[in-house]
Structures are given as C-alpha cells and as structure tokens.
Image (cartoon, rainbow, N blue to C red):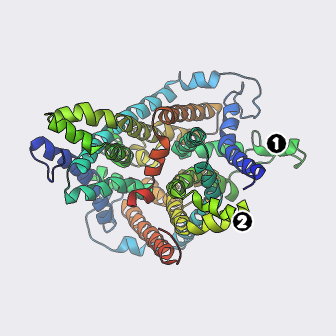
Amino acid sequence: MIAERPQGALARLTLLYPAAVLLVFFVIPFGIMLAVSFFRREPGGFYLVEFSLANYGNLFTALFARVLAFSLLISAFCALLCVAAGFPFTYLLTRMPRRRQVVWLVILVSVLSLSAVIVAFAWSIMLSQTAGVSNLFVRLGLLDRPQSWSPGFWALTCGMCYVAFPYTVLVLYPPLARLDPHLPEAARTLGASPLVTFFTVIVGSLRSAIVAALVMVFAFNLGTYLIPQILGKPQHWTLSVLITDEAIYRSNLPLAAAMAVFFMGVSLALVGMAMLGGRRRPGGAA
Amino acid sequence: MSRALRGLFLGAVLIFLLSPIVVVGGVSLNAKKALYFPPKGVSLAWYAELFGEPEWLLPIANSLAVALLSSLGAISIALPLSYALWRYRVFYARALLLLGIAPFMLPPVITALGFLAFWATVGLYGTMAATVVSHAVFFVTLPLVTLSLGFESIDREIVEAAQVLGADNREVFRSIVFPMIRSYLVSGFAFAFVLSLNEYIVAYMVAGFTVETLPIKIFNALRYGYTPVMAAVTIVFVLLAALVFGLIGRFGDLPRLMGALTPESRAS
C-alpha cells in the first residue's frame, strides 16, 4: 500500500488537483495582492498596472501609526488576559474526567465558531442600558441606575477576550494534556501546597508553551475586524478595519494592499521575535 | 488549587461564556420591539419574522448554499491531499500541507484582500462562485487537519494484511480506509460548514454587496438599529453550533481533534 511515488493517472490526480486548486486560488491571489500594492489606483475601478512605490510612501500617516499602535496594544493586552485566565483553566480542564472535558470542549468550540458579528451584538446587549448587567448591579444595590457600557474600551476588551479565550484554551490544550501527571503529584508528595505546585512546577515546566500561546493569541487578535466596529469607538478601530475601509469604501485597493503587506510584515516580525525569545529562554521545555 | 477556589474559578469562566447568550436569549423573547432583559412579555414573533420574511430568508438561503458548497469543496481538496500525504512519500506533499494550513493562519483580512484582488482581476468579483471558492480554500485547513489525523489512526498492518489476502487499492480503500476515516471526514465537513456559515470578512470582501450572507445581513441591519430579530438569529446560530459540535463530541473524539487543531501540535 505504501508506495514511494504515485503511479497511474488517478493516483497522480490525488496530488495534482489539490495542488492546482491551492496554487490558483491561494498562491496566485496572494501574489496579485503583493503586485497590486505596487500598482496605481484607478478611480472608480480596482487598479491600474503601473509600477510605483507611492502606496508605501502614503502609508505612514499619523492615523496609520496610531491605528497600528492601538491594534498591537489591544491585541497584546487581550492575549495577556486570555492566557492568564486560560492557562489555569486549561490545566483544570485536562484533569477532568473525559465526559466533563467533552462538555466543556463543546461549549468552547461552539463559542469559538460564532460569527464575530454575533459575539459583538451579544456583548453590546450584555452591556446595554435596558438589558445589560448594570441592571443586575442596580438590583444588588451597587449602582443607582442602569448604565450603558458599550461602546468603549472595556466593551471591546470583553468582546475580544470572549472570542480569544476559547482559542487560547485550544492552543494550550495539547501541551497541558501531555504534561506528565506524576510531576505535580511528586511536588505534592514533597510537601508543596497545590497553589505552589501550580505556579512553580506546572507553570515552570511549560514556560515555552505559555510564550507560544501568548504569541498565537496575539496574532489571532490582530485579525479582529468586526468587534472594534460594534463594541469600540472610532478611536478603537484596528488596522483590519482601516484596511477594509480603504479597499471597499475608498476603493483604493493598491493602498489597502500595501497596508496589508506592511501589516503582515509587522505581525510576522513580532511573532518571530517572540518565538525566538521563548525558545532561547533557559529551562523551557519545547 | 483548593476545591472551593477551583469551583469558583470554573463557575466564573462558565458565566463569562454563557451569560451573553442567556441575556440575548431573553431579549429574543420580548413581546414588543424593544430590547429588555428580563424580557417584557413572552413571544416567539421574532423567530417567526426570521423564518418568514424574505428580507431574512434570502441571506439564510445564501449562507446555507455557500456553506454547503464550500465545505464540500474544502473536502474535495482535503481528502485527496491527506490521502496522498499518508500514502506517498513525495517531498512536495509536505509543502502542500503547509499551503493548506496557511490561509487559516494569516490575519483573515489579508487573505480576504488577496481573494478580492484575485476575483477583481479575473472579473468574478461579486459573484456567488467567488464566495464559494474563497470559503472552500479559506477553510480547507479544518478537514485537512481532521482527515490527516484520521489517516494516521489507520493501522498499516491491517492494510498490508488485506493486500496479502489479495485486495486491490480500491477494495482496501472501500473496506478499510474509508470506514476508518469516516468520522474524521464528517467532523472536518462540520467544522468547515459551521465556520463558513459564521464567516464575515472574506464573504464581505469578495461579494459583500451582491451575495448577502447572514452575518453580512446582521451587520448591515445593526447599522439601522437593533431589533429582537437579531437576538433570535444569534440564538439560532448558537443552537446550531451547539448541536453540530455536541454531535461531534458525542460520536467523535473531540479531545483528540482539539489536540490536533492547534498549530503548536501540528508543527511537532
């Protein structure tokens, strides 16, 4: 059954067809986008084939810099929150009996699969004046009257973390599931309290997995597009919003492409740096 | 962690994950066109509007068509590719696997913009074909990963035994390989289908003004003000996802799939 190379027309087709589809519909679009970032804008159309570096020159406006900085900051902040909560959660999850694990995983995957439109809508209701949690606080006597907490920075944070948390758990699940269960047991036998065991033995032995998760969730957050538009104010819009705006509403595809290429470069560089930093740290098990 | 602390923490996570859905579920039942929680009066009128008005039925039909066709398309790429990866040792098969995973790893707006530039260039911008093919490529990662896992779980000795007993390739595939990968095929299809139903930015970029899918419709409707119909859509989406993933959890191996769906484990 195991052959070194495919033989016969049908066997060759099993590789040729997927290769052709991915080449035509993924590699070529990507190449076109790269090329378009060097082309000129055609008013009312898409682009004119004419080489220029103008798009990259036009990139560095104060608005672009501010939006880029905010995108990086909010993505990093939410990644930090999600990993801080997600790591102990995933640890507990991997120690549960299988049936309960499956129930939790169904909840997490269902939330993760939800459209960002729906998540943002749900959180804007959750933080609204008529239906939101502030009503609960009024009933508990913590507030005088219900308040609207959306849109705003914290509403955006809630929405982004709501999507990123299940993702964080999925990223952390494999390394934590592989963790030798004898390790914490040994620490407990030697007299460490459960909390001390958790912070020294478990966090310590999975340091590089934590760094990897931070990077992954950060990169995932950078893609957020809809949530800032619904739960944030205009000053909270991210680079993804700016790029789409440029491509669709200002119909300046070349500038949007240049932004996207730059954005990809920045995120790849940051991810690469963080990965290297995580790997070099002494004592980190891969 | 002590028992009480652990319960408190898990409870807090559960509340964080479920309370927005509970609140939206309550809002979807309001008797009047207002967003109150707890709802004022109980009515299913908003669900009736969702499944009765052409304004909502058309996006529902679009979304279902796109999700069905694109997840079938994703399977059609992923099945031969993962089969070839398992069956042949050729150098470019690994490269193809990476290529199949890449669309899902980039920030979606970048992939979406690539699709937009492509469809604008070939002149199919704004057609449903563009949405379907883009989604098929965008979500190919999911069936690719689940199917690769399925093929890995096949015991090669059984395959060899069947061959020794005189089975040809086709018979081996029909009697051994296919039954072994069936549940992974279904999971991969289900993941691609549900995510395509929920996807916004690619669908919006390649045909947002002509092929209105349900997420695009919801976002457009949000601009004109909130109505309980959107709460009803949300609940329908949540129930659908819970049903699909609940079935995978019940009949498939969700913990194993979870381990495989993250890039960290794929790299190793």
> What percent of the width, then of the height, locates residue A178?
50, 56
- Whether A65 is drawn above or below B218: the answer is below
Instruction: Please name whichever residue, A26 or B72, is drawn nearer the observer in this view of the structure.
Output: B72
User: Residue B236 vs residue B24: left or right?
Assistant: left
Q: Quadrant of residue B175?
A: top left
Q: Amino acid at mark 1?
A: Leu
Q: Residues within 10 Å of mark 1 (few under 14, many from 20)?
A: some
Q: Say which chain tag 1 marks.
A: A
Residue beneath the point at 50% across and 76% down: A277
Q: Residues within 10 Å of mark 2 (few under 14, many from 20)?
A: some
Instruction: Please name whichever residue, B12 or B111, is drawn nearer the observer in this view of the structure.
Output: B12
> What percent of the width, then of the height, locates residue B220?
53, 41
- Whether B235 is drawn above or below A53: the answer is above
User: Residue B161 vs residue A237: left or right?
Assistant: left
Q: Quadrant of residue A182?
A: bottom right
* Disc on the earlier residue, 1 or 2: 1
For the question of whether residue B223 can be seen, the reply is: no
> What percent of the width, then of the height, locates residue A241?
51, 57
Q: Say which chain tag 2 marks.
A: A
Residue beneath the point at 44% across and 72% down: A272
Instruction: Measure the C-alpha gap from mark 1 to mark 2.
Output: 40 Å
Residue beneath the point at 27% across and 71% down: A51
Residue linked to disc 2:
A192
Q: Amino acid at mark 2?
A: Ala
Q: Secondary structure at mark 1?
A: helix
Residue linked to disc 1:
A136
